[in-house]
Structures are given as C-alpha cells and as structure tokens.
Image (spheres, grey):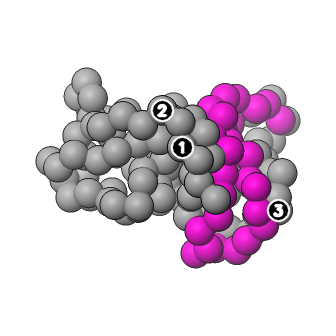
Amino acid sequence: MPNPGLIKSYNAESGINPYTIVKFGANDLGVVPAAAATDKLIGVTREMGSASGEPVDVIHDGITYVTLGGTVTRGDLLTSNASGQAVVAAPGVGVNNRVIGIARQSGVAGDVIDVVIEPGNVQG
C-alpha cells in the first residue's frame, strides 16, 4: 500500500506516464523520464501522468508504486531502464548505478509494485 511522504510538483518537459522514475530536465523544476541507471534519479510520478508542459507530481520519499521494466524480487535495489521503468540495479565491477529504492514486492515487466523510495548509489 502506498504511503508517500514528500510530494512536489514539477513541470513535465516531455510526456510522462504514471509510476515512472524521473530525473531533472533541462530547466529548474522540470522533470523527464529517467533513461539510464546512471541518471540522477529523484523520484517517481504519481498515478496521474502528464503531457509535456503540464504539472506532474513526484514522490521523493515514502512508499509508492512504480512500473517494472523487468523481473524484480522483493528486496532488490531498483534503478531505471531507458523508459523510466524500474529494473534491478546490477552494475558491473567498478561501475556506479543510481538507485531509486527497494522493491517491496516481486514482479515482472509491466507490473506495478510497491517501492520504498531511497535514492542513492551502488557500485559493482
């Protein structure tokens, strides 16, 4: 069950789906979907996505939903794929990945699961 903490509104600099991992865009207070495990991940969008130029709410901490881009097991550290969907952070030796949080449920690509938002880094 979601239990979001800090929620802030931003300007969507492109179309953003619900439950998508986001990063800062080109402008202050602008966001776009994350596109890589090395992006500076800041949060996950709420149940309402947004069209480009419209407001979008981003959850920065607490528990929320995220859409999966691959197979995940509860307890896995999650990062972003090229579409802002959550995948397991699995960096190679000496490589850093940004993480958005920890999976509370297991699932497969396309599933929407609970995630504990805890942005950070992990090194392989």
Label 2, residues with CA under 10 Å away: few <14, some 14-19, many ≥20: few
Residue 86 in view here = no
Q: Which residue is denoted by mark 2 in the rendering?
A: 6
Q: Residue at x 59, y 54 (%)?
A: 2
Q: Are marks 2 and 1 in contact (CB under 8 Å)?
A: yes
Determine the secondary structure under disc 3.
loop
Q: As shown in the figure, which amino acid type bears the numbered disc 2? A: Leu
Residue 68 figure quarter:
bottom right
Q: Which residues are magenta?
A: 96-124
Image quadrant holding the N terminus, namely bottom right
Q: Which residue is denoted by mark 1 in the rendering?
A: 4
121, above or below 51, in the image: above
Asked whether 109 falls inside the magenta stretch, the response is yes
Q: As shown in the figure, which amino acid type bears the numbered disc 1? A: Pro
Q: Which residue is denoted by mark 3 in the rendering?
A: 73
Q: Residue at x 47, y 41 (%)?
A: 59
User: In the image, is 124 to the left or to the right of 26?
Assistant: right
